[in-house]
Amino acid sequence: MNNNYYNIKLFVMLGLFAAGANAADINAGKAKAAVCQGCHGSAGVSSSPLWPSLAGQGAIYIESQLNKFKSGQRENEVMKPIAAGLSEADMQNLAAYYASLSGKSAGGGLDAILIAQGKEKAGMCLGCHGNNAQGTGMVPKLAGQQPQYLAKQLADFKKGARKASQMNAMAQSLSDDDIKALAAYLGSL
């Protein structure tokens, strides 16, 4: 029995060391992120309406999206070749780096009336994306994203060009005006 105790203790310690060896390296992610800065911003905050901000996005979500770009499950002509060259460790490191950064609102200069209309409709989003649209685990952070980017993603979900069963179904109920309002509100956060 005493021997079993030591074997279990050794097994647990080896498991902890192995888990530590696989831990993401934020500094390695920062170095790897140099190629990402042109679209996603130097601190992960995009100034372009075409590209999402990655700062403060959940690591699990970022890693899953990189894997989807790499496998072709999610299509994007810019991201596919970039993701194809990433190892699992690279993806984990990039995800940890971007998750460690603080995001900011895209909100300056947005239409206050549109924001108010979006706030009225946002309850349908906040159930999954969190009370402040900060994201949770595999569900992305929407707060502070560029409104044009958000509107494009919602339109793509509605058309089925981007696939995620819950989002495809949810987007079907949105009018073009709803999409603009939601994008303005979420970008203002």
Image: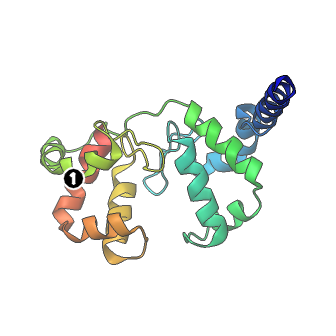
The x, y position of residue 30, in whole percent, is 71, 36
**Residue located 15% across and 51% down the image:** 121
40 lies left or right of 23: left
Q: How many marks?
A: 1
Left or right placement of residue 70 versus residue 113 in this view: right
Q: Give percent across and percent down for residue 134.
A: 38, 38
The percent coordinates of residue 104 (x first, y second) are 42, 33
Identified at 43% across, 48% down, the residue is: 140
Depth check, front residue: 1 or 16: 1
Q: Nearer the viewer, residue 161 or 15?
A: 15
| Farthest front residue in view | 1
Does residue 75 lie above or below 188 as drawn? below
Q: Nearer the viewer, residue 132 or 105?
A: 132
Q: Position of residue 78 (x, y in %)?
A: 62, 65
Q: Could you tell me which residue is drawn at 74 percent across and 53 percent down?
A: 88
- Residue pointed to by mark 1: 124
Q: Quadrant of residue 25?
A: top right
Disc 1 marks a residue whose amino acid type is: Met
Query: Against 11, is 123 above or below?
Result: below
Q: Where 64 falls versus 110 (above or below)?
A: below
Which quadrant is home to the C terminus?
A: top left
Q: Residue at x 34, y 46 (%)?
A: 129
Q: Is residue 140 above or below residue 28?
A: below
